[in-house]
Amino acid sequence: MQARQSGGKETVTIKAGDRIPKANFSIMTPEGPALRSTDEIFKGRKVILIGVPGAFTPTCSNAHLPGFVNKAEAFKQKEIDEIAVTSVNDVFVMDAWGKATDPAEKISFLADGSGDFARALGLTLDLSERGLGLRSQRYAMFVDDGVVKKLNVETSPGKADASSAETLLEQI
């Protein structure tokens, strides 16, 4: 992980070759909210993880996530076990967003309600001036057995170019 300065504090940013930090996400199950650990998601598996600033936001819903839904089969052909999206939103919002944007359930929706995972990655984004608080930066990564192999982080939260499904698909 690379160290960088942020508001007088040093933060660590994950990079290719680093191991995914241990964390828990909230997911919705038929029985209600439950936890799912990073070990359950990544250990011994090939996973695409998409980070977005917010569920139901225009770029996330209209430009970023649809590419991964549409390319899900192409990722499976590359032996990807799971495609997941995470956001600093609660489990109920993520569940509703999943139902609205991915009714075929090609993507797993992982709630990082308190932003603990985004902070552990060093990929936070402060959107307090816009009334959104601390969020995740927009990114897409390919993780193999818990190790980041490719990481594409956007320079602007309103763009979904470097982190697009097409870009990541070409890299793996």
Image (tube, rainbow, N blue to C red):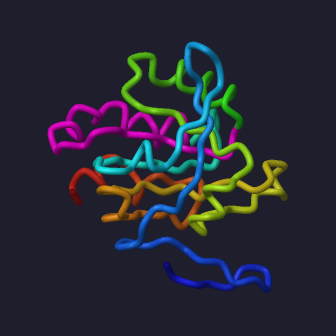
Please report the residue visible at 29 percent of the width from the left and 50 percent of the height from the top. 44
Image position of 42 (left or right of 38): left
Image position of 75 (left or right of 105): left
Near-viewer residue (59 or 53): 53
The number of numbered discs placed on residues in the rendered structure image is: 0
Q: Can you say whether 55 is above or below 136 in the image?
A: above
Please report the residue visible at 46 percent of the width from the left and 33 percent of the height from the top. 108
* Residue 75 among those drawn in magenta: yes
Near-viewer residue (22 or 15): 22
Q: Outermost residue toward the top?
A: 30
Near-viewer residue (67 or 25): 25
Residue 111 found in image quarter: top right
Please report the residue visible at 62 percent of the width from the left and 84 percent of the height from the top. 4
Image position of 95 (left or right of 75): right
How far from the left and from the top, in percent, is residue 7? 79, 80
How far from the left and from the top, in percent, is residue 21? 52, 62
Near-viewer residue (49 or 130): 49
* Residue 71 among those drawn in magenta: yes
How far from the left and from the top, in percent, is residue 68? 36, 38
In the picture, the quarter occupied by the C terminus is bottom left
Q: Which residues are magenta?
A: 60-89
Q: Outermost residue toward the left?
A: 77
Please report the residue visible at 42 percent of the width from the left and 54 percent of the height from the top. 140
Image position of 2 (left or right of 157): left
How far from the left and from the top, in percent, is residue 84? 44, 40
Q: Can you say whether 40 is above or below 153 in the image?
A: above
Residue 120 found in image quarter: bottom right
